[in-house]
Amino acid sequence: MFSTNEQKLRDIKALMLPVMKRKLGVKAYGLTDDQIFSPQIPSYTKLFEMNMKWNFRLIKPDVPKEVREIEHQIRQLKVSRDMLELDKEYVLNKLKRMLRKFSESSLTRYIQLKHEFSVQKCEDLQKRIFPNE
């Protein structure tokens, strides 16, 4: 059901290597796939960690079901074909229509949680950059 970080990295590597090689062009000549992809691993690992923290935050008892449903709907929209194939205006309108289904209090709570989470990420980053402060 759930994939490990290693599985996710293998999947991402399989999808991204052709794109990375094309983007690097001549610079990729003579490099192994691991040499091309390895510098990206810490970034992806950090994203996996942030995603897990966000998911754990959403399942806490103080988060209403409707707020979880907002996140679910947004994720579905992010991975829909429309997101890739249609213009930005269409996708934005689809997002607005989807959000109208939810109460204002749920939307406000969702925004608060997102803000709380992003502030926490900024504080974590600041601690890593300035560890003695």
Image (spheres, rainbow, N blue to C red):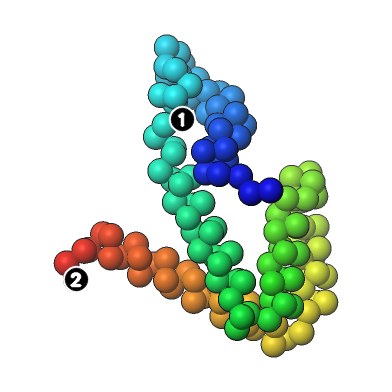
- Residue at the location (72% across, 77% down)? 65
Label 1: state its secondary structure.
helix
Q: What residue is rendered at 51% in x and 63% in y?
A: 53
Q: Position of residue 113 (x, y in %)?
A: 56, 76
Between residue 53 and residue 133, name the one nearer to us: 53
**Quadrant hosting residue 77:** bottom right
Q: Is residue 16 visible?
A: no
Q: Residue at x 47, y 55 (%)?
A: 49
Q: Which residue is mark 1?
A: 37
- Using the image as rendered, state which of residue 33 and residue 25 is in the foreground: 33
Against 52, residue 83 (above or below) is: above
Question: Contact, CB < 8 Å: mark 1 with mark 2?
Answer: no
Identify the residue at the far top of this view: 30
Lateral position of residue 78 relative to residue 118, left or right: right
Residue 131 at x, y percent in the picture: 21, 63
User: Farthest residue toward the front?
Assistant: 1
Residue 85, position as x, y percentages in the image = 78, 44
Q: Quadrant of the C terminus?
A: bottom left
The crowding category of the residue bearing disc 1, from other C-alpha atoms within 10 Å (few below 14, some 14 to 19, many at least 20), is: some
Name the residue that disc number 2 marks.
133
- Disc on the earlier residue, 1 or 2: 1
Residue 129 occupies which quadrant of the picture? bottom left
Q: Is residue 73 above or below residue 40?
A: below
User: Residue at 34% across / 62% down in the picture?
Assistant: 125
Q: Position of residue 119 (x, y in %)?
A: 43, 73
Q: Is residue 90 above or below residue 30?
A: below
